[in-house]
Amino acid sequence: MPQQPLAQVPLDATWEWQERGACRDADTALFFHPQNERGLSRVRRDRAAKSVCGRCEVRAQCADYAIRAREPYGVWGGLTEEERERVYVRAALSDYGREKGAGLRAAHDLLPPGAVTG
């Protein structure tokens, strides 16, 4: 489980992108693991969630928001809790900005090529 503080909404956060998310009609259980889920079950659920994110037009905005807000739970923008934790470990919050796009720059190597287009 990530060790960062609870999510902190960035001051410039906007929400209209969420209306266009591919996840809008998906079961939220796909993106947020049940307590104590481990092993192959978790891998499969994360893969299924990432496949939804992979076809999402707002994936970049979602990943950027989750990193900047230090979202502690779930798959956001195709990044798991553990993948976002790697971003946080690499740089303290003060080392990367909270302006739009800063989260994407911090996670550039964790996102597939072309994911950082919008």
Image (tube, helix red, strand yellow):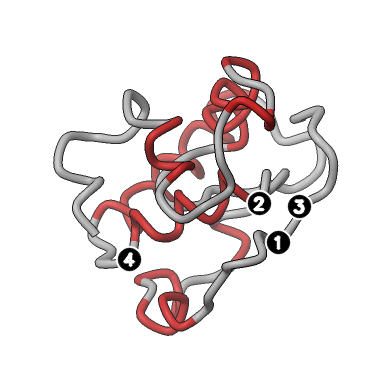
Disc 4 marks a residue whose amino acid type is Val
The label nearer to you, 1 versus 4, is 1
Contact check, label 1 and label 2, Cβ < 8 Å = yes
Looking at the image, is mark 1 or mark 2 earlier in the sequence?
1
Query: Within 10 Å of the Cα at label 4, are there few (<14), some (14-19), or many (20+) other Cα atoms?
Result: many
Looking at the image, is mark 3 or mark 4 earlier in the sequence?
3
Contact check, label 1 and label 3, Cβ < 8 Å = yes
Contact check, label 2 and label 3, Cβ < 8 Å = yes
| Depth order, front residue of 94/39 | 94
24 versus 38 height, above or below:
below
Instruction: Give the residue drawn at x 72%, y 44%.
Output: 72
Which residue is the site of mark 2? 69
Which residue is the site of mark 3? 7
Looking at the image, is mark 2 or mark 4 earlier in the sequence?
4
Which residue is the site of mark 1? 9
Q: Is residue 26 left or right of residue 92?
A: left
Query: Within 10 Å of the Cα at label 1, are there few (<14), some (14-19), or many (20+) other Cα atoms?
Result: some
Q: Is residue 113 left or right of residue 43?
A: left
Disc 3 marks a residue whose amino acid type is Ala
Q: Label 2 vs label 4: CA separation?
A: 16 Å
Residue 29 position in % (x across, y down) = 62, 61
For the N terminus, which image quadrant? top right
